Amino acid sequence: MAQSVIGLYDGPDSAQAAADRLQREGFDRSRISISNSSDLGRFGVTPQDTDLYADAERRGGSLVILNSIDDSSASRAQKALEDAGALDVDEVSTALRNDQSNATLKVLREQLKIGKQQVQTGGVRVRTYVTEHPVNEQVSLRQEHVQVDRHPVDRPVDPNAIDSFREGTIEVRETAEVPIVSKEARIVEEIGIGKTAEQTSQRISDTVRQTHVDIENLSDSNFDETYWRSQFDRSYGTTGGATWETYRPAYQYGLLARSRPEFSNVEWTTAEPRMREEWESRNPGTWSRYRDAIRSSYDYQMAGTGMSGSNQRAYADNAPPESKEEDHRGFFEKVADALTGNDIDDKTGRPVG
């Protein structure tokens, strides 16, 4: 039966070295891949293990997968991956659970950026072409005609004109006018083409997204259940439909909001608009109902009176550790240090608290 073998490494260089090790052990290079966790579903990996590998990848880990090998080769491939420095998945899982306190959440907010782009909205096309049409003009023409008139006469010849018996020729020519046509091109119209620009204002409306973070304290050690339950009973216990389970988050929200840096030493009247926006984003239409409960815990936290010992300890636990060295270690360094008992930060060379 064909199966796949997967190895988890602390980075791409280690994963590449493991892939080379498998190839030297005689495994087909086409069956070896350095993949990401999104490919694991087709290898039959359970969703729980896929989430584990994905979390390790986000912290810099890399996966080496040898697929479609028989049972006899699986143990040999597993040993080769372990010899190449594959991490123990169970230890990584434990380290990931213990490392949740150092997780970093990125709060995102979209910003609306408006630019300008020139687009074509219309225009004018001017085309010239030539047509012909008949033109009629009236012109007067002169034409000559020769007329020959013969009249019979009977008179003597002048002796001096006796030479008239000589032969001769007389020519009289006719002339006539004929039309001569010529053409002259003249400019009869001018068309000017240009552009004008005008500035207009346009209102752009859109929506932007923002990441909101809900911080829920999973431990009740910082919330004095007895005290706030008694406050609820006095204020709302006789109100129809009011239950402690529905008002408990309101009291907690006021206390937790007051401990946040942006609300430190901020009066209720200043903090209320921001707190209302946050509350309504998670519990639409309920601010007016729970407002007084939220304010009572907010003002109580601000006054600092009547605090239970657990709440006082909460302030001490949240105070910045002045005497501890800041921990700069990466996830996989923490895993290695947990296995060896080492508490030295490789970057600073100092022990971490």
Image: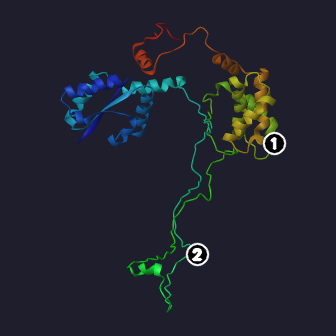
> As drawn, which residue projects farthest toward the left?
26
**Front in this rendered view, residue 130 or 185:** 185
Q: Which amino acid, by three-letter code, is at mark 1?
A: Thr
Mark number, residue 176? none
Which residue is painted at 63% across and 17% down in the image?
Answer: 317
As drawn, which residue projects farthest toward the front? 159
Q: Is residue 91 left or right of residue 236?
A: left
How would you rate the neighbour count of disc 2 (Cα within 10 Å): few for under 14, some for 14-19, many for 20 or more? few
Q: Position of residue 127 (x, y in %)?
A: 54, 58
Q: Residue 306: x and y, percent?
A: 78, 21
Nearest the viewer among 209 and 33 is 209
Dividing the picture into quarters, in which one does residue 334 lie? top left
Query: How would you rate the neighbour count of disc 1 (Cα within 10 Å): few for under 14, some for 14-19, many for 20 or more?
Result: few
Q: Amino acid at mark 2?
A: Ser
Find residue 167 and report its horizontal and vertical position in percent: 37, 79
Please say whether residue 108 is visible from this viewpoint: yes
Distance between mark 2 and mark 1 Cα atoms: 124 Å
Look at the numbered disc 2 and give the secondary structure of its residue. loop
| Image quadrant assignment for residue 201 | top right
Residue at (49, 85) in percent of width and height:
148
Q: Compared with residue 88, is residue 183 higher up or lower down, i.e. above or below?
A: below
Between 47 and 231, the one nearer to me in the picture: 47
Upstream in sequence: badge 2 or badge 1: 2
**Residue that badge 1 annotates:** 238
- Front of the two marks 2 and 1: 2
Which residue matches tag 2? 140
Residue found at x 45% / y 21%: 331
